[in-house]
Image (tube, helix red, strand yellow):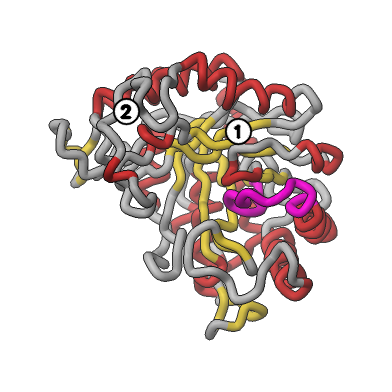
Amino acid sequence: MADRTSASRTRRVLVALITCCLGPALPAAAKKEPPVTTIILPDPTPAKLPRWRGFNLLEKFSKDWNNGPFREEDFRLIHGWGFNFVRLPMDYRTWIANGDWRTFNEATLKDIDQAVAWGQQYDIHVCINFHRGPGYCVNPPKEAKDLWTDPEAQEVCALHWATFARRYKGIPNRNLSFDLLNEPNDMENAVYAKVARILVAAIRREDPDRLIISDGTYWGNKPVPEIADLHIAQSTRGYAPMEISHWKASWIGGSDKWPEPTWPLHPEAKSGPFDRATLLRDHIAPWKDLEARGVGVHVGEWGAFQHTPHAVALAWMKDCLANWKEAGWGWALWNFRGSFGILDSGRKDITYEEFQGHKLDRAMLALLQEY
């Protein structure tokens, strides 16, 4: 009974804290009583991240694709199934006003406030990520000014992060983290490190204690030891080999010509042969070396697109999950609802379970819960 009382008291403090920090900007829905099952989230440090497990939520992933509010149902289901992490990859154009990248739309920011509050209500760590930051996005269209070379883009991107840092100051790191930029491309690490330092400094001027995460370069796959002295964590990816994760993905040129994948990957494949040992050697070991330098590691995105044969996807996912569990790393599937997810993924080779208005991939859910 003492443990339950302590947990309840802790939750009341957290709810009071977010109300104090965000004030009336939080909708009333954020202040509902927490679910019956209460799990106190672990405390992260930049040197050692918890083994968070969860999903990316895409409501503000791209202004051209969507700019809806986040859904409480997602948080409720994710919590109910035993997961404790969501990453919010977002497009800065969704929260600026009238196309002016120096002016902020309060209504959109309140949508993000609500997601942060639901994270606290449902015991889910929320990681805010700039999928498109001022001056850079891995996806088209290309930004008018280049973040890596243009001083104004660097200043404005720092302004955006400073705004978020000020807005959420005081919310515990167990509940909230910042992921600087989604998947810096194949630039030199030194080029990325220069900009990362500018953004980290902007955040820390407003909130010196905020937990910050940096994606690796080479689209999230390459560690960046050049910023190990910043005392921030780093995020890797789980898309290797692409022949499995992105088979017939429309945005990957030529992927419709790749042979149907197997796992382990057959020798004639572009990346073949490829198996669990390959994953360990090429995609775990370099990041373990970074971790040994005092940098926490998390897998911010991973998964297999809807056209990959389901049995192959599950076999590959099982090996990925086993590797990360052994490494002590958490992960976030791309996505929760949609073509990589466990709900409404549009796969043609499985029988879905009807679940609360969704089509549930029960086998994939069970596999994720196992790890």
**Mark 2: amino acid:** Ala
Q: Residues within 10 Å of mark 1 (few under 14, many from 20)?
A: many
116 falls in the magenta region: no
Identify the image quadrant of the C terminus.
Answer: top left
Q: Is residue 68 above or below residue 234?
A: below
Instruction: State the residue position of label 2.
Output: 313
Give the residue displayed 80% in from the left and 42% down from the top: 227
Q: Is residue 342 above or below residue 94?
A: above
Instruction: State the residue position of label 1.
Output: 298
Q: Quadrant of residue 206?
A: bottom right
Give the residue displayed 13% in from the left and 31% down from the top: 351
Nearest the viewer among 141 and 50 is 141
Of badges 1 and 2, nearer the viewer stands: 2
Extreme residue toward the front, this view: 268
Nearest the viewer among 167 and 219 is 219
Q: Which residues are magenta?
A: 177-193
* Number of on-image labels: 2
> Is label 2 in a helix, a strand or a loop?
helix
Q: Residues within 10 Å of mark 2 (few under 14, many from 20)?
A: many
Position of residue 156 in the picture relative to residue 35 (left or right): right
178 falls in the magenta region: yes
Q: What separation in Å lies between label 1 and label 2 (alpha carbons)?
A: 21 Å
